[in-house]
Structure formats: C-alpha cells, structure tokens
Image (cartoon, helix red, strand yellow):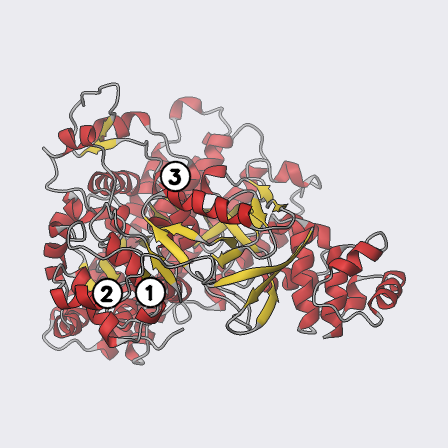
C-alpha cells in the first residue's frame, strides 16, 4: 500500500476503535479505493459493502443497495403516508415498504449480524434511497437508532458523478428534501458523519497542475489557470499520427463511433473474443463489452490493475495490439518497448451470508465473468473514465454538460505534459454544485479528529463492554420460546421438549440480575474522571470467568437439542426456532470472548484489529462443541442415521465454498493441495476449467507445482518435441502446427515450466 497519510490512518482508527460513522472523501487519485481494500482486510467488524449501481458494486467487491436491502426502484417518501402515483413516477413510503417487501432469511441474518456498512461511490446515492436503507435496517434489526445501530462508512468524491433524479420525481421529493445528495437525507441531517478528506495526491506530482485542479474543484478557477490550460490547445491535433492518446468526450455515441471508425480503418482481420460466464452473472453488470472485437494495431487500454507481482499494467494504461490468436492476445507498450500477453481477469458476482459456526459475515460467489480486462481506447466518455489514470489524453470538453465534468476529465491525467485540449477551455459549464461546496465546509480539522478519536474510542470500548453483558433481549427470546409450547397440543412432538425449554429459560433469567449489577459497575468505572483500564480489565476477567460457564452450557444444550430434532420428522418450524435461538446464544458467548480480547488489546496499548479480536477458541468454538455432541451420541448408542440427507433433514444444502480474501491463484493452490482435481476445483470455485488451468500456469512458473504433477508423461513428450528450438514470443504458430496434440492451456503450462 502507498505510504499511508494521516487522514487515512485516522479513518482506519475511527472504523476499528469507534462506532462513529465516517464520510471519507478526497480528490481523484488520493487512494480512496486502496484505503477501502485496507479497511476490509483489517477490520474486526462484520462488514458489508454496497454501491448504488451494479458496476460500482462489482468494482468495490460488494453488492448493489437495491439487492441487499430488497428495495424497489423508484422514489421513497420518508413518512407513513399513502403516496400518489402517476404513470411516469412511482413512490414507496415506510407504510408500503413495511407491507409489501418480504426479505429472505439469509438477508435478514446478514443485516442482523452487520457491524459496519460501507457505501461506495456515495456521490451517486440519492437522499431518499439512503433514508429507505435506514428504515429497512431499523426494521430488520428492531432498533430505533440510525441504521439500526450499524456504523456507516460513506466513500466518494461529491464533485464526480451526481445522483440522478428525474424532474417529475423531484417535483414530489422537493417537499421532503432540500437537495438530492446523500447528505440531504434525513438520517444524515440528524446524524452527520465525521467528514475526513484524503488530500495527498498519488496520481499527480506537478505542482502547477495540482493547483489548477484544486482551483477548478473549488470553483475558484482564475484567468491565470485558464491561460495555463489553454497553452495545451491544439484543435488540429492529428490523433492518428500521434499514437497513445485517448480522446475524452462527453457523449457515449461520440466515443463509440470514434472507436468503431478507428477499428474499421485498420487493415487486417477482425478477431472476436467472448467471456467465460459461470453461475449467476446478470448481463446488466457485465464489467466490459461481452464481445471484444480487435485487430492488430488497435489502441487498447486496461480496465483493471495487474494483480500479479510483475505489475505490468494499471487501470487506464494504454497499449497497441501486437498479435492475436484464437486464445492469445499480445499487447505492446511502445514507450517501454515491452510486450506482454494479456491474462484474463475474474470478476465475481457475490452475495453475503452468515457463517453458521463463527457468526461472521462472509461472501458466497454466485457467478463469475472471466474476460480480457481491455477495451478499445481511441476514445472514452468522461463518465466512464472515472477511476482511470492516463499518461496522454486529448480532451474534447467543448460541450461539458455537468458541474465538475471538466475537473473529472482533467484529473484523469498524471501531468500537463500528456494533455491536449481540442478546443479552448471556457468558463461556462465548469462550476461545481454549490450544495456540495457548502457541505465541504464540514471537513474535520486534524486537531478535531485527534480529540474526537480519543473520546469516541473510550465511548466505543465502554459501549462494547456493557452491550456484551446486556442479555435482556436474549432472555426475552428464551421466554418467547418457552411460551411457544402450546398447552393444547400436548400430543405434538414439540410439547415433549417444554420442560427442557423452561429449564434453560430459568438459567438465563438467573444471570440477568448479576449482569445488570456488573453493567452499572462498568458505568461507574467509565464515568470516573481518570479511567483505570487495568482495573476494568481485571473486572472483565472476573466477570468472564463467572458468566462464561452457564452461557457456554446454554449453547451446548441448544446444539444438543438441534441434533436431536434433526432426527425427528415433521418439526421444521420447531427446528427453525431453535436455529434462531442458537444464533443469538452463540453470538452472546463469542462476544464475551471478544470483549476479553478487546480490553486486553487496549490495556497492552495495541491497535484494535481483526487479528487481535480472534483466537482459535473463537474460530473453532461451534465445531468443537458439535463434534463433542456427536461423539456423545455415539457413546450413548443414539442411532446415528447413516443416510446423511436424513440427518441433515432441516439444514440448508451445503453452499459453495466461501471465498476469503486470498489471491485467486492461492485459493486454487490450496484446493490442489487438498488433492482436488482440476474439474472439482472449477466446480467449487464457480469457474471454468480453462480459468483454473490459467492459475496453474502461474503456479508452475513460481515452482509451487511441478508440471509433471498436472500433465501425463506422453503429453510432456509431445510438448517437449514441439517446443524444441521454438523461440517466438507468441504461441500462435506453434498451436497452428501442433494444436491436435495438446491444448492452449497445456502449451502455456509447458512454456511456464521452461522459464
């Protein structure tokens, strides 16, 4: 990661050691995306990432707001009225959301277990949509606090893409909202997040250029700035003669026709490439064109960063097509005199779920889209250039149509040296939205951040600890369960377990009084002028010892009961009730374990992080208990039904392996070590066999796997004979000659073994 700035360090601390919601912003090129990745990797909190559009969600590694919160498309009126609909506009209210929108158990479970919600590309988020999210979260979590008590991290640059609200919608919404941006929402107006701005720019280093961009961004552009930029005006600039320039224009059709024409003008054969799509990956979120059409000599750019150690390219890097084969694309970078083979990139469509054993939120891959991460690059719209970095660009900003578009277009460039303006820059049309400029005045100073961090950290630790010992909701769930055993249905299967439920409810109720006393003791200790953390740590240790045993036994009891009920027919509703109770009871015990680690971390003066708040006891807590129960079942000669399907009658079918944040090649390697075949790995990872073979090319190259482990001896002999004396950069000619004896994947693996 780039050297972390002070603002970035503050953001990480506010996320990990406070409950304060944060708005993280920063000019183009200040590293917002890099910091988001760092937060996701290091936070100890159950995190969900959402974004307003499918493509933005895909880029952030999350899901769309509408799918996560089951929200309908259309406006939201933040009250309980019955809205008026017209043919062209549709509005929901709290009342209609409550009545009509059913949420799956999986989503509810994720929302109940969520601790941090990250909203990326927040510039595009409408005020009414944010209020609808807030309402849904409060409803599902049954908590009447902003977002049901979840911390929110808003990320985005408000001077980039604004929200879209049609005029006819705005006519209704303006009676409820002062403006359309996320900060105009009722929830943000009443609970403003901490405003942190990343200011260190990693993209540009030229002070003159940075100054012009800052002035343009802040509506303070001077005549001198205009003169500086207009030195780069070249209306007759010949783009054909000057390779490596991309034209930034304001309209889609102009960019598309420029690319199509330039491709047509090239001699040579047109070659088409299509993606490998596995599982569920809707076409509306395809990250690149489905059909990639290329010719040798075409100007292309990469749309992702190179994830490999070599870092051959970055998002926005330009190159020229050097050669094309049916399964091979070589791109040449003239300025470095370097040619590389383009590797396919894997995009994942995910959903969130809660791990049954750790109660942590994790990702499940629903589908993958594997394609070359390149596109034609003679022209691109300003809109689609967001997040890209160019060395050379020609700007066609004569028809700028949105505030801030000139800023977005110019800020894509690394320096003024690579700039060409196809027409002089005029002052009209480049002013930014005044609401956004006014909101920027809320930016927190460093001294405020320092004092707020100290205060909020103390608050966070205090609240974390008292919430750990507050079991009133848990006890109420046990009571509800006890009362659910209907006396009338004495003959029902469930009624046989009423005594058990009564006994467990008494156990939790007996803990309520001592836990309340302990909470008031904690409140006193935190209320003192000087908080003695060592003394608090001792008290937590004692409380942990006192409460863990009975709480732990309740988990054992309920897991035992679940094992019993699995073997009984026609009690699905009973089983489901037990599962909900088990989730709550286990969460309470795991929270107890984490609270002890939290206070120990704080006392040791260490940073609160994911690593510090976990242990092998926490990770293996449920699996060890389940194993112990199954062993006891065997000892007691309780029939363990051989038919696994029967025992697992009520449990969900095993879902695909959850993906942790390892590299895609590493995940394939770990499955290979477990002796899984290439076909099995492809099924588990929701990828094609061809994609898995491309991972083996890298594993063979790094000597993690020997080629003899993957290919049989006769195949290796064929490959050795074909490669003898072959010196070409491209495998095209070799495959044309020997394509019947081995596949492209096998040839690539063999070539990797030679390096």
> Percent from the top left, x then y, of residue 592?
35, 62
> Percent from the top left, x then y, of residue 139?
26, 38
Instruction: Give the quarter of the figure containing the N terminus.
Output: bottom left
Q: Provide the residue designation for mark 2.
A: 229
Instruction: Give the quarter of the figure containing the C terminus.
Output: bottom right
> Percent from the top left, x then y, of residue 448?
12, 71
At 50% from the left and 72% from the top, the residue drawn is 335
Do tag 3 and tag 1 residues touch (Cβ < 8 Å)?
no
Tell me the quarter of the picture where residue 392 sits.
bottom left
Q: Provide the residue designation for mark 1.
A: 419
Do tag 1 and tag 2 residues touch (Cβ < 8 Å)?
yes
At 35% from the left and 57% from the top, the residue drawn is 236
Could you tell me how many numbered marks the image carries? 3
Q: Provide the residue designation for mark 3.
A: 67
Q: Residues within 10 Å of mark 2 (few under 14, many from 20)?
A: some
At 83% from the left and 72% from the top, the residue drawn is 725
> Percent from the top left, x then y, of residue 431?
15, 53
Q: Is residue 210 left or right of residue 340?
A: left
Work out how far the residue at label 2 is from the one at label 3, CA to CA, in angstroms.
Answer: 44 Å
Work out how far the residue at label 1 is from the one at label 2, CA to CA, in angstroms.
Answer: 9 Å
Tell me the quarter of the picture where residue 68 sits.
top left
Look at the numbered disc 1 and give the secondary structure of its residue.
Answer: strand
Give the residue furthest to the front. Answer: 236
Work out how far the residue at label 3 is from the one at label 1, CA to CA, in angstroms.
Answer: 41 Å
Look at the numbered disc 2 and give the secondary structure of its residue.
Answer: helix
């Amino acid at each position: 990661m780039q050297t972390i700035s002070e603002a970035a360090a503050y953001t990480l601390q506010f996320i990990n050691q406070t409950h304060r919601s944060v708005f993280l912003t920063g000019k183009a090129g200040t590293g917002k995306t890099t910091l988001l990745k760092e937060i996701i990797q290091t936070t100890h909190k159950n995190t969900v990432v959402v974004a307003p559009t499918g493509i933005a969600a895909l880029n952030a590694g999350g899901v769309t707001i509408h799918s996560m919160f089951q929200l309908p498309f259309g406006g939201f009126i933040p009250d309980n009225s019955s809205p008026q609909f017209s043919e062209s506009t549709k509005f929901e209210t709290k009342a209609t959301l409550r009545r009509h929108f059913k949420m799956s158990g999986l989503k509810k479970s994720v929302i109940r277990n969520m601790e941090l919600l990250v909203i990326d590309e927040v510039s595009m988020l409408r005020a009414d949509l944010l209020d609808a999210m807030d309402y849904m979260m409060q409803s599902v979590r049954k908590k009447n606090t902003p977002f049901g008590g979840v911390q929110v991290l808003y990320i985005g640059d408000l001077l980039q893409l604004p929200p879209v609200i049609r005029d006819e919608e705005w006519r209704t919404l303006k009676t409820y909202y002062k403006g359309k941006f996320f900060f105009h929402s009722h929830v943000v107006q009443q609970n403003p997040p901490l405003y942190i701005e990343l200011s260190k720019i990693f993209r540009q280093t030229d002070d003159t250029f940075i100054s012009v961009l800052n002035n343009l961004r802040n509506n303070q552009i001077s005549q001198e700035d205009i003169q500086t930029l207009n030195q780069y005006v070249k209306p007759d600039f010949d783009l054909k003669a000057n390779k490596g320039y991309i034209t930034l224009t304001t309209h889609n059709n102009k960019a598309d026709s420029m690319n199509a024409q330039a491709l047509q003008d090239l001699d040579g054969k047109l070659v088409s490439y299509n993606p490998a799509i596995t599982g569920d990956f809707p076409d509306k979120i395809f990250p690149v064109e489905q059909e990639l059409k290329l010719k040798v000599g075409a100007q292309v750019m990469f749309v992702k960063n190179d994830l490999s150690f070599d870092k051959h390219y970055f998002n926005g890097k330009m190159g020229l097509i050097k050669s094309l084969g049916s399964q091979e694309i070589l791109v040449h970078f003239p300025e470095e005199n370097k040619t590389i083979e383009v590797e396919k990139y894997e995009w994942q469509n995910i959903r969130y779920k809660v791990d049954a054993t750790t109660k942590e939120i994790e990702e499940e891959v629903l589908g993958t889209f594997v394609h070359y991460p390149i596109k034609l690059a003679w022209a691109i719209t300003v809109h689609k250039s967001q997040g890209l970095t160019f060395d050379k660009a020609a700007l066609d900003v004569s028809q700028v149509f949105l505030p801030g578009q000139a800023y977005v277009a110019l800020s894509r460039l690394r320096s003024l040296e690579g700039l060409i303006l196809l027409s002089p820059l005029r002052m009209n049309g480049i002013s930014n939205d005044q609401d956004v400029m006014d909101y920027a005045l809320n930016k927190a100073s460093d001294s405020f951040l320092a004092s707020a961090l100290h205060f909020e950290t103390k608050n966070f630790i205090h609240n974390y600890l008292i919430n750990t010992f507050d079991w009133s909701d848990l006890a109420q769930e046990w009571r509800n369960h006890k009362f659910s055993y209907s006396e009338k249905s004495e003959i029902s299967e469930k009624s046989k377990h009423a005594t058990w439920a009564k006994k467990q409810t008494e156990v939790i109720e007996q803990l309520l009084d001592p836990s309340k006393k302990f909470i008031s003791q904690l409140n006193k200790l935190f209320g003192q002028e000087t908080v003695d953390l060592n003394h608090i740590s001792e008290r937590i240790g004692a409380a942990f010892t006192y409460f863990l045993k009975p709480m732990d036994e309740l988990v054992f009891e309920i897991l035992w009961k679940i094992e019993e009920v699995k073997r009984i027919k026609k009690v699905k509703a009973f089983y489901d009730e037990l599962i909900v109770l088990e989730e709550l009871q286990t969460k309470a015990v795991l929270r107890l374990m984490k609270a002890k680690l939290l206070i120990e971390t704080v006392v040791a003066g260490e940073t609160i992080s994911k690593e510090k708040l976990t242990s092998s006891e926490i990770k293996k807590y449920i699996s060890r208990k389940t194993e112990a129960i199954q062993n006891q079942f065997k000892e007691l000669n309780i029939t363990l039904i051989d038919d696994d399907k029967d025992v697992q009658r009520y449990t969900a079918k095993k879902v695909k392996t959850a993906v942790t944040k390892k590299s895609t090649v590493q995940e394939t390697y770990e499955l290979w070590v477990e002796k899984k075949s290439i076909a099995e790995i492809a099924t588990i990872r929701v990828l094609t066999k061809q994609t898995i073979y491309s991972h083996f090319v890298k594993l063979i190259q790094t000597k993690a796997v020997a080629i003899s482990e993957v290919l049989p001896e006769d195949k290796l002999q064929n490959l050795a004979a074909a490669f003898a004396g072959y010196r070409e950069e491209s495998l095209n000619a070799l495959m044309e000659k020997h394509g019947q004896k081995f596949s492209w994947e096998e040839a690539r693996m063999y070539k990797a073994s030679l390096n």
